[in-house]
Amino acid sequence: MNSLANFFCSIGARAAVREAAPTHIPSSQTDQKDEIDATVKSVSINAAKARRLDRWLDKVVAISGSNTVLFFTVAALVAWVLAGIKLSKNTGWQVGISDAQAIINMVFDAFLVRQQLNAHEQGLVVACHLQSRTLTHKRMLCTLSRMEKPQQANSLQRNTLEARADLPTEDMIGRFCNAVSAFMGHVATVTAYVVCIIIWLAFGHYRHWSDVWFFYINTSTSALMVFMLALLANDRERHEKFLNQCATRLMTVDANLEILLRDMTKDSIENEAVIIEASAVSKLQRAINFYADLVGTLLGIALLTLILVVWIVLGPVMKFDANWWLLIGTYAGLIGMNDGFVLKNLSNVCARYEDKHYEQQILDDADLVAIIGAPSSQASESQAVTQADVRFSIAMGNFCSHEYTVAVGLVSILGLLLVASLMRWNEQGQIICNVPPSIIESFFTLILITGHNIVDKQRRANLQSIYQNRLDLISHIRQWQA
């Protein structure tokens, strides 16, 4: 009974993250370090899951976001467009991309949720390690501040540190994909998409609201969705790998700062464990979290596989007719629409919580510098947003990701189901359950790309700020060395 009660109480709840940064104590107190990474070459966090199935699934998710999958997707879309030169009047050509998008959509939604949850956990673990060492740095800096400062500074010059202050850069392919992502996520692109939908609606009366008219937009949004899902998965995977590289370099410098301070203060107390508690959320948000956890976990992937198997088994029974094809499109369209709302909500909630801790770390770093009376080089790298289009994008993202917006989306899905039921689930009734969700999900995916780009830029700025602070601290602390 207690186990059952604990299960229901844990639904949608996020677990606290408890981590202690590895303690680095110098092997010899007389070692003189001419390079800041002379003692510790690399410090990284092992993010591998304990269960083999989880590790396998994470590898599959990583493959889905690879450049190979993105380029293959683009090539397949180009081939489909070229085939349309001869087959554009064939309904099968239009239905084909719609059904392909339906299946791809369900798979990528599950992978995108898992990507987001993995990145969120990794981001909080890095924040824990930084906070853990910050407590140690603060204790040792207080000790150091009471020591007499030599008149002559150490021979290591500040400009040597500044030359190494930049974090890694992405390769040419990464920069190109970033440019495409920036274009797709720009507010002008989102506006152009909305204008296209309005124009399509305006022609509905002249086309007598026919099935062909519906197919026009369904085909377009299906092709767009396939591209955007592959692009978003690629963006997230590349950016997460890049941020992990940045975090590795940052924590390596942080570990060397720890060794330098321990060598000077003779401190040997281990780094404390830091706990980042899960944020308090409403019952509605917990329900959204539960759905996201279900979609992105092994159970969710298993359910997805089962649904696809059942659909395939129904093929011979339904003689692979139009209704069989529309069946998966209808299901995926409605589920995909809900996933679009949930993905945007999950992305925004996770980003806000992570940013809160990284911005606090920047403030804590300023306190560390103040302890030894050194000038702070922190320019307000917490990045106040000044561009109007970025402010508008953030406001739009906040609105679209609100928990009440997710609830409205669910009510809309129920409304579509009611309309289709009143139409006895005829072909047009199924199309109605295909097209509006496809339009809405495409819009939310554009907004999701916009939000991801903003969050990624902010995270890079925060890591750069913390990294620069560590280098500055090392420069100032060496002035106490004889």
Image (tube, helix red, strand yellow):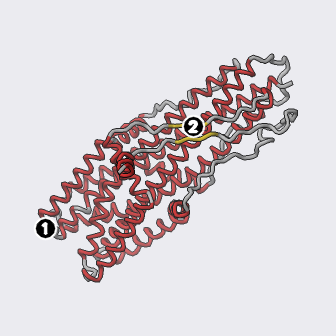
Closer to the eye: label 2 or 1: 1
| Number of other residues with Cα within 10 Å of mark 1, as a class: few under 14, some 14 to 19, many 20 or more | few
Q: As displayed, is residue 92 above or below residue 42?
A: below
Q: Secondary structure at mark 1?
A: loop
Residue found at x 37% / y 67%: 103
Q: Position of residue 359 (x, y in %)?
A: 53, 32
Q: Position of residue 408 (x, y in %)?
A: 25, 46
User: How many callouts does the rendering have?
Assistant: 2
Check the image and name the residue furthest to the left.
422
Circles 2, 1 touching at the beta carbon (< 8 Å): no
Q: As displayed, is residue 62 above or below residue 127?
A: below
Q: Is residue 280 left or right of residue 325?
A: right
Q: Secondary structure at mark 2?
A: helix
Q: Is residue 116 left or right of residue 274?
A: left
Q: Position of residue 256 (x, y in %)?
A: 74, 37
Q: As displayed, is residue 122 above or below residue 74?
A: above
Residue 169 in view, yes or no: no
Quarter holding the C terminus is top right
Foreground residue among 81 and 477: 477
Asked where in the image residue 373 lies, by quadrant, the reply is top right
Indicate the amino acid at tag 1: Arg
Indicate the amino acid at tag 2: Ala
Foreground residue among 201 and 373: 373
Q: As displayed, is residue 404 above or below residue 328?
A: above
Residue 339 in view, yes or no: yes
Q: Position of residue 205 (x, y in %)?
A: 15, 59
Q: Which mark is residue 424?
A: 1
Residue found at x 86% / y 34%: 32
Q: Which mark is residue 461?
A: 2
Residue found at x 45% / y 39%: 278
Q: Which mark is residue 246?
A: none
